[in-house]
Image (spheres, rainbow, N blue to C red):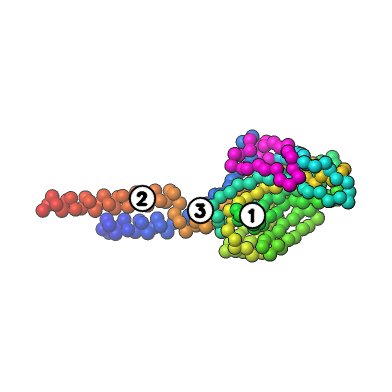
């Protein structure tokens, strides 16, 4: 086989190699400090929070409300501490995160929640899933919601202290949420995703308590670039092109010398 033909085949081979999914967010909370890429913001009725990053967990042990707890029968705003990160919009993705919850010594009187949420970066929600304890007379539930259809599901049959692995996957608009590898909710949404949130919440009702909430890992990958070569492949491609150019110049120089 002639050299140019060989190089051409090499180029075709390199371009046909599949690329791996692009990593957007990957935090295992295992370095002792909250990564600066996260923006921590008190929202609604939140004033301050107590947390630590230890082992492989980001654990929240207290959220202080701005307003004093209200008596039963009076509505109050949740005290929410929110972590957020923005990124270039993506369409197809796989979000994988692990959470755990503990009602603490307060038992059923704990009113708290932890959820991971995806948005479009312009204030619109795409989907969220997590643990919700909205009542001070019973333990919490697992819950998920998809937008813009506002389709939701909630299940109270979970223990007061536990953990879960949650996956939110979207391919060509088909969005599925899995709880411990079992399908929990499915809907359709093709709005581009450009932001991720981790929400920790406490409801300041008189007599309500706060145990602890943890996130073990958050990993978001996108397959939008699956048809494009990976950087290592591009390096090989560049090398092959350079070699091809060198070979052509060498042939021309040899012809000139022979002439």
Q: Give the left or right position of residue 198, taking residue 134 as reference.
A: left
Which mark is in front, 1 or 3? Answer: 1
Per the image, the residue denoted by label 2 is: 238
Quarter of the image that includes the N terminus: bottom left
Q: Quadrant of residue 176?
A: bottom right
Q: Main secondary structure of the magenta part?
A: strand
Question: For the residues marked 2 and 3, what is the alpha-carbon distance in whole angstroms?
Answer: 19 Å
Secondary element type, mark 2: helix
Question: Looking at the image, which residue is at 68% across and 45% down?
Answer: 82
Instruction: Point out residue 7 in the picture as x, y percentages from the top left corner.
Output: 31, 56
Per the image, the residue denoted by label 1 is: 123
Q: Are marks 1 and 3 in contact (CB under 8 Å)?
A: no
Per the image, the residue denoted by label 3 is: 20
Q: Is residue 137 magenta?
A: no
Question: Looking at the image, which residue is at 56% across and 50% down?
Answer: 87
Q: Quadrant of residue 29?
A: top right
Instruction: Point out residue 116 in the picture as x, y percentages from the top left corner.
Output: 68, 50
> Which of these two is toward me, 215 or 74?
74
Instruction: Point out residue 256 in the picture as x, y percentages from the top left corner.
Output: 14, 52
Q: Is residue 41 magenta?
A: yes
Provide the residue span drawn in magenta: 33-58
């Amino acid at each position: 086989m002639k050299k140019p033909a060989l190089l051409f085949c090499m180029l075709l081979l390199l371009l046909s190699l599949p690329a791996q999914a692009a990593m957007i967010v990957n935090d295992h909370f295992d370095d002792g400090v909250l990564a600066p890429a996260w923006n921590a913001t008190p929202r609604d009725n939140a004033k301050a929070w107590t947390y630590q990053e230890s082992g492989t967990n980001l654990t929240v042990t207290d959220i202080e409300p701005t307003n004093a707890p209200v008596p039963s029968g009076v509505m109050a705003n949740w005290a929410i501490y929110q972590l957020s990160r923005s990124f270039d919009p993506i369409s197809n993705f796989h979000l994988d995160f692990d959470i755990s919850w503990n009602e603490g010594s307060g038992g059923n009187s704990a009113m708290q929640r932890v959820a991971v949420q995806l948005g479009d970066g312009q204030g619109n929600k795409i989907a969220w899933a997590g643990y919700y304890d909205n009542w001070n007379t019973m333990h919490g539930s697992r819950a998920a919601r998809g937008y813009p259809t506002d389709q939701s599901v909630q299940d109270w049959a979970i223990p007061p202290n536990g953990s879960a692995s949650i996956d939110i996957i979207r391919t060509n608009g088909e969005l599925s949420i899995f709880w411990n590898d079992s399908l929990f909710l499915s809907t359709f949404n093709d709005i581009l995703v450009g932001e991720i949130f981790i929400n920790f919440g406490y409801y300041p009702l008189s007599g309500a308590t706060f145990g602890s909430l943890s996130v073990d890992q958050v990993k978001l990958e996108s397959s939008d670039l699956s048809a494009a070569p990976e950087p290592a492949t591009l390096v090989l491609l560049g090398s092959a092109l350079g070699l091809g150019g060198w070979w052509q110049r060498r042939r021309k120089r040899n012809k000139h010398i022979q002439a």
